[in-house]
Image: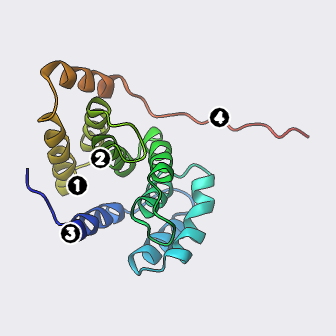
């Protein structure tokens, strides 16, 4: 496996975040948040992304997780990053899935678990295309070198049976 320097790795992941313009409601706010992130205006990025994350926007959750993982505008906190990635991954965001997979691979913010790392990286690769897919597949294959054949089969089965979360709004109490 080719190991990228940390800065190159972060730049690659930041580029992956901005691929495929969102077509969901509040896309302008999401776009502003992503643009602010790329300009290094992390406080502004958080102000734009946080309300979207509160409304379960998977891309916003993934980007905030990335900010916590790397200490961009917030204190570096792997546990917070893992929480944001988990919520974005559960909603089907490939970036969040890949980042969560890498956290399981390294044991950052979660217990180290190669089977879960493989599952999330496999899902990320399956739900993207082009360079992004190739990158996630390379990460998945690197994790596979640390696993037994049986563990790989379990990781594949977990990915095949996974379905995105369906969030049900909670009715107000009054």
Q: Check residue 168 in the rendering and tell me which mark sits there, or answer none.
A: 4
Quarter-of-image position of residue 106: top left
Which badge, 3 or 2, comes first in the chain's sequence? 3
Q: Which label sits in the foreground, 4 or 2?
A: 2
User: What's the CA distance linking mark 4 and mark 2?
Assistant: 29 Å
- Circle nearer the N terminus (3, 4): 3
Measured Cα–Cα span from mark 3 to mark 2: 16 Å
- Nearest to N terminus: mark 1 or mark 2: 2
Label 4 with label 2: CB-CB less than 8 Å: no
Q: Which of 76 and 36 is in front in this view?
A: 76
At 38% from the left and 27% from the top, the residue drawn is 162
Give the vertical position of 160 relative to 8 (above or below): above
Residue 132 numbered tag:
1
Total marks in image:
4
| Residue 53 horizontal/vertical position (percent) | 57, 55
Q: Are marks 3 and 2 in contact (CB under 8 Å)?
A: no
Q: Label 4 crowding class (10 Å Cα cut-off): few <14, some 14-19, many 20+?
A: few
Question: Would you call the spot at circle 3 few (<14 residues within 10 Å), some (14-19), or many (20 or more)?
Answer: few
Say if mark 1 contacts mark 2, CB within 8 Å: no
For label 2, the residue is 102
Which residue shows up at 52% across the image and 72% down it? 45
Which one is in front, 130 or 106? 106
Could you tell me which secondary element the residue under label 1 belongs to? helix
Q: Where is residue 21 in the image (x, y as percent from the top left)?
A: 39, 63
Question: Which residue is at the far top?
Answer: 150
Compute the Cα span from label 3 to label 1: 15 Å
Report the mark closest to the observer, 3 or 1.
3
N-terminal of the pair, mark 3 or mark 1, is 3
Residue at 37%, 47% in the rendered image:
108
Mark 3: which secondary structure?
helix
Residue drawn at point x = 8 percent, y = 55 percent: 2
């Amino acid at each position: 496996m080719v190991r990228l320097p940390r800065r190159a790795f972060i730049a690659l992941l930041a580029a992956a975040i901005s691929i495929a313009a969102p077509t969901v409601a509040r896309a302008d706010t999401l776009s502003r948040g992503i643009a602010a992130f790329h300009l290094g205006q992390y406080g502004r990025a958080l102000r734009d992304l946080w309300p979207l994350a509160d409304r379960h926007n998977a891309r916003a959750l993934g980007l905030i997780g990335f900010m916590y993982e790397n200490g961009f505008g917030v204190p570096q906190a792997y546990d917070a990053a893992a929480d944001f990635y988990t919520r974005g991954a559960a909603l089907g965001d490939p970036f969040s899935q890949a980042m969560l997979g890498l956290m399981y691979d390294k044991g950052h913010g979660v217990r180290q678990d190669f089977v879960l790392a493989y599952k999330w990286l496999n899902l990320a690769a399956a739900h993207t295309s082009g360079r992004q897919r190739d990158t996630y597949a390379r990460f998945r294959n690197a994790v596979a070198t640390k696993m037994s054949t049986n563990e790989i089969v379990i990781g594949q089965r977990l990915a095949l049976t996974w379905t995105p979360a369906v969030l049900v709004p909670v009715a107000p109490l009054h």
